[in-house]
Image (cartoon, rainbow, N blue to C red):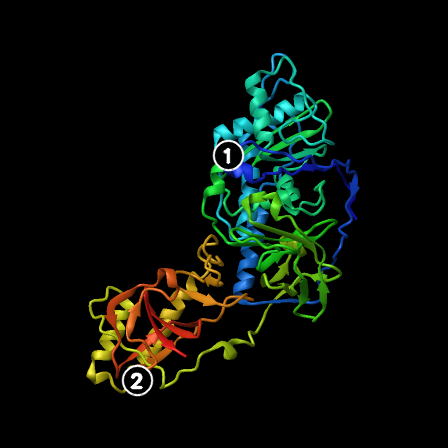
């Protein structure tokens, strides 16, 4: 059992609607409590990980787990202290100079930020010299004045400028501290540990509002500024600028951000005291506090969430809805799959694994019992053909060649089926090709999930990637629309000049059903539909 003392003092920024409008900002004072904690990895949830029972995952999940484990393993783990933090040490008395931190510190922290954002299918962010310099000025000013970690320091409302700090530096420190995640810590953590603590929000002085997490996982965040400085009081003042008014006007990269995220999720990020779970909605406001149920899909154990709160008025991360809760007495076990049902709001599932590979229980491949259930059987009542001989798609041209060859009547079905499987496999190959795109929920009120280029699956929640079903369809049913469309998704859906004709067969690499309509994928930007 490892004991360590962590004096984690966090002050989460408050951004009201006035900030979005670019008018005067109002700050709410946050409670400050000195935290001297002994972390024993216990909390509202009982976490169990056993190496005696193998965890079952699909091949795709195992691949993703190994990828995340390797990424985590390769993240920099160097601890920083006053001797290795600076590229140019600050001078905290007259003449005041903010100094600078090493590129190693900045890059390490940014690596962790983007590692965690990728876990939540969010785009990477960048940093730049100007924002880093301003964050460093802010950290050094707070270190110089030994800013009280037990009072609100956003905007330095209770601090007085010493004569040796210029008006310019003081103004920068006031503005940047008002728009940053602030971390005051006496332990020599790694740059990544600071980000991990902000993500889990374990030591949030305001309890369960998860404001630091919301800013780290903001669906509109594009950049950040990073700085740190040690004061004579031995505190390391860490600054991560996160609130940029211009970001508030940007389109959200993702409509829904849940913690834990859907798919596979590291159990380490749920272990410990006071780790609230959360749901953020980018463009939809939910009032009140919904009923939340968590179910272990392996054991059937069910728990009702406790301490459910709605912090939507706070505006953290430029989210319209901020719901937080604790999962109750549900047991969290590496390898188990859980369903989260936020009544009338959102429902999804996730499966736990250990991001530290050495702690991972043995992984076994799960035989997918839903494959036959999810497949759409080939049927003579479903049909397909088209007059797109001018198509530039190689697969489609090959299919058309086979269809039009009268000498191939005996073999056409098997050839088409092979073509269908090839088309399906091409879609499967890079299915999670882009974490920014994969799993994105579009903003039309319907839950369309992007499963890769030109692939769409419609449901309220998705346990995992639905199987892609390849097959052959025959055009002999009048319920099938004869037009070729670019996409089944309405906003991307354009009718082409090409169409299908009766009496011919085609290979499809995927079939999906949305709004009582079945769509068949014939090639890139080539879809036909059948009304069910």
Q: Secondary structure at mark 2?
A: loop
Q: Secondary structure at mark 1?
A: loop
The front one of 286 and 213 is 286
Q: Residue at x 64, y 33 (%)?
A: 80
- How far is disc 1 from disc 2 in space, using C-alphas? 61 Å
Q: Position of residue 132 (x, y in %)?
A: 53, 30
Q: Is residue 33 above or below residue 173?
A: below
The front one of 208 and 424 is 208
Q: Earlier in the sequence, mark 1 or mark 2?
A: 1
Q: Is residue 323 above or below residue 495?
A: above
Q: Nearer the viewer, mark 1 or mark 2?
A: 1
**Rendering quarter of residue 425:** bottom left
Q: Is residue 389 above or below residue 124?
A: below
Q: Position of residue 445 (x, y in %)?
A: 48, 61
Q: Is residue 260 above or below residue 18?
A: below
Give the crowd class for mark 1: few <14, some 14-19, many >=20 residues within 10 Å. Answer: few
Q: Residue at x 22, y 73 (%)?
A: 387
The front one of 497 and 137 is 497
Q: Is residue 160 left or right of residue 474?
A: right
Image quadrant for the C terminus?
Answer: bottom left
Q: Position of residue 492 (x, y in %)?
A: 36, 60
Give the crowd class for mark 2: few <14, some 14-19, many >=20 residues within 10 Å. Answer: some
Q: Is residue 50 visible?
A: no
Numbered label attached to residue 22: 1
Label 2 sits on residue: 476
């Amino acid at each position: 059992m490892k004991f360590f003392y962590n004096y984690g003092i966090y002050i989460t920024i408050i951004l009201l609607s006035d900030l979005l409008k670019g008018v005067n900002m109002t700050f709410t004072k946050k409670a400050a409590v000195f935290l001297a904690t002994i972390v024993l990895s216990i909390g509202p949830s009982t976490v169990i990980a056993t190496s005696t029972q193998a965890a079952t995952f699909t091949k795709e999940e195992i691949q993703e787990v190994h990828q995340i484990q390797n990424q985590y393993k390769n993240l920099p783990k160097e601890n920083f202290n006053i001797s290795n933090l600076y590229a140019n040490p600050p001078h905290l008395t007259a003449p005041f100079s903010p100094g600078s931190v090493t590129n190693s510190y900045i890059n390490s922290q940014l690596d962790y930020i983007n590692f965690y954002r990728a876990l939540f299918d969010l785009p990477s962010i960048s940093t730049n010299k100007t924002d880093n310099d301003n964050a460093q000025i802010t950290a050094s000013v707070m270190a110089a004045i030994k800013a009280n970690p037990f009072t609100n320091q956003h905007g330095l409302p209770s601090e007085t400028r010493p004569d040796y700090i210029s008006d310019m530096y003081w103004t920068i420190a006031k503005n940047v501290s008002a728009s940053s995640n602030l971390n005051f810590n006496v332990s020599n953590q790694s740059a990544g540990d600071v980000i991990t603590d902000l993500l889990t929000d374990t030591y949030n002085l305001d309890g369960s509002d998860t404001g630091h997490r919301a800013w780290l996982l903001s669906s509109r965040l594009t950049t950040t500024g990073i700085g740190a400085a040690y004061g004579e009081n031995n505190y390391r003042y860490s600054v991560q600028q996160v609130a940029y008014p211009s970001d508030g006007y940007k389109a959200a990269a993702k409509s829904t951000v849940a913690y834990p995220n859907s798919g596979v999720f590291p159990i380490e990020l749920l272990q410990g005291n006071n780790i609230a779970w959360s749901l953020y909605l980018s463009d939809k406001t939910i009032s009140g506090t919904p009923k939340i149920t968590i179910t272990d899909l392996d054991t059937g154990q069910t728990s009702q969430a406790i301490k459910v709160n709605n912090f939507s008025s706070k505006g953290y991360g430029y989210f319209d809805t901020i719901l937080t809760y604790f999962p109750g007495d549900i047991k969290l076990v590496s390898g188990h799959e859980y369903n989260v049902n936020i009544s009338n709001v959102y429902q999804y599932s996730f499966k736990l694994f250990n991001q530290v590979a050495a702690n991972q229980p043995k992984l076994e491949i799960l035989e997918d019992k839903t494959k036959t259930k999810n497949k759409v059987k080939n049927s003579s009542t479903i049909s397909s053909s088209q007059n797109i001989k001018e198509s530039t798609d190689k697969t489609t041209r090959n299919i058309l060649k086979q269809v039009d060859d009268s000498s191939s009547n005996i073999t056409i079905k098997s050839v088409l089926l092979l073509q269908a499987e090839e088309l399906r496999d091409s879609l499967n190959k890079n299915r999670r090709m882009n974490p920014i795109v994969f799993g994105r929920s579009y903003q039309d009120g319907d839950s369309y999930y992007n499963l890769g280029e030109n692939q769409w699956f419609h449901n309220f929640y998705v346990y995992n990637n639905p199987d892609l079903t390849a097959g052959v369809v025959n055009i002999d049913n009048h319920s099938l629309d004869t037009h070729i469309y670019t996409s089944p998704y309405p906003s991307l859906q354009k009718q082409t000049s090409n169409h299908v004709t009766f009496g011919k067969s085609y290979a499809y690499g995927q079939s999906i059903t949305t709004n009582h309509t079945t769509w068949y994928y014939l090639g890139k930007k080539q879809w036909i539909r059948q009304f069910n």
